[in-house]
Image: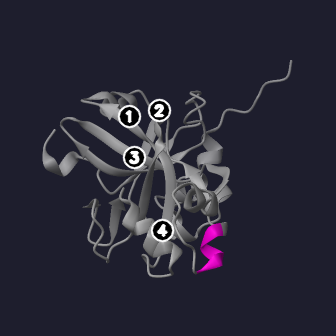
Amino acid sequence: MNQATYLTDQFIIAMPNLADPNFFHTVAYLCQHNKDGALGIVINRPTDMKLGEIFKQMDINVTVPATAETPVFAGGPVQQERGFVVHTSGGDWHATMAVSETISLTTSRDVLEAIAAGEGPEQYLVALGYAGWGAGQLEKEIMDNSWLNTPPGKQVLFDTPVNLRWSAAADQIGIDINLLTAPAGHG
């Protein structure tokens, strides 16, 4: 695969036939995709946890109480004890990887401290865990019609209600993903 065919900074949308409970009706934002594999963050699986619980566990002082009510997402089945922050670019955090000119991924504590103080990124999504694929695995799953890739959209990533993100990501390319769902038969 050449560099132009990698899907970094794209959404991958679970096709209705993808029955894996980790990914059923999910949309993931691909933060990295290269010859060695892919790393994505599922953006439509909020957990019951709020960011305030993470601040408390990490002994982070909260000066902007509203940030404590931010939902924490289940980013994927790999390393679920590890936090990932997908956010608008800007700021100088220790462990940040630019995904695109406008979106970055940070895994260091300092971004959470900045969010708690109201000095963090303009928009962000905090997730525990990530979705990972080995070399060639994601490409095979796409060929097997398990995933649909679409361009990213900040609107879908940060502003669209969580329960609408799966269909909104597909809508970006004119596909009503709900029409691809095979209706349950009744005999």
Residue 109, horizontal then vertical, whole percent: 40, 61
Side of 12 where 168 appears, left or right: right
Instruction: Provide the secondary structure element on which disc 4 rests.
Output: strand
Q: CA distance from mark 2 to mark 3?
A: 15 Å
Q: Quick one: label 4 or label 3, which is nearer the N terminus? A: 3
Q: Which amino acid, by three-letter code, is at mark 2? A: Ser
Q: Quick one: label 2 or label 4, which is nearer the N terminus? A: 4
Instruction: Provide the secondary structure element on which disc 3 rests.
Output: strand
Mark 4 — residue?
124
Name the dominant secondary structure of the magenta segment: helix
Mark 3 — residue?
40
Q: Nearer the viewer, mark 4 or mark 1?
A: 4
Q: Nearer the viewer, residue 55 or 4?
A: 55
Q: Are marks 2 and 1 in contact (CB under 8 Å)?
A: yes
- Residue at the front extreme, as displayed: 59
Rendered position, 67 above or below 165: below
Residue segment shown in magenta: 64-68
Quadrant holding the N terminus: top left
Mark 1 — residue?
142
Q: Residues within 10 Å of mark 2 (few under 14, many from 20)?
A: many
- Numbered label attached to residue 146: 2
Q: Is residue 141 found inside the magenta-colored segment of the image?
A: no
Instruction: Provide the secondary structure element on which disc 2 rests.
Output: loop
Q: CA distance from mark 2 to mark 1?
A: 6 Å
Q: Which amino acid, by three-letter code, is at mark 3? A: Gly
Q: Nearer the viewer, residue 52 or 22?
A: 52
- Numbered label attached to residue 2: none
Residue 172, horizontal then vertical, whole percent: 48, 62
Residue 82, horizontal then vertical, whole percent: 44, 45
Q: Nearer the viewer, mark 4 or mark 3?
A: 4
Q: Residues within 10 Å of mark 1 (few under 14, many from 20)?
A: some
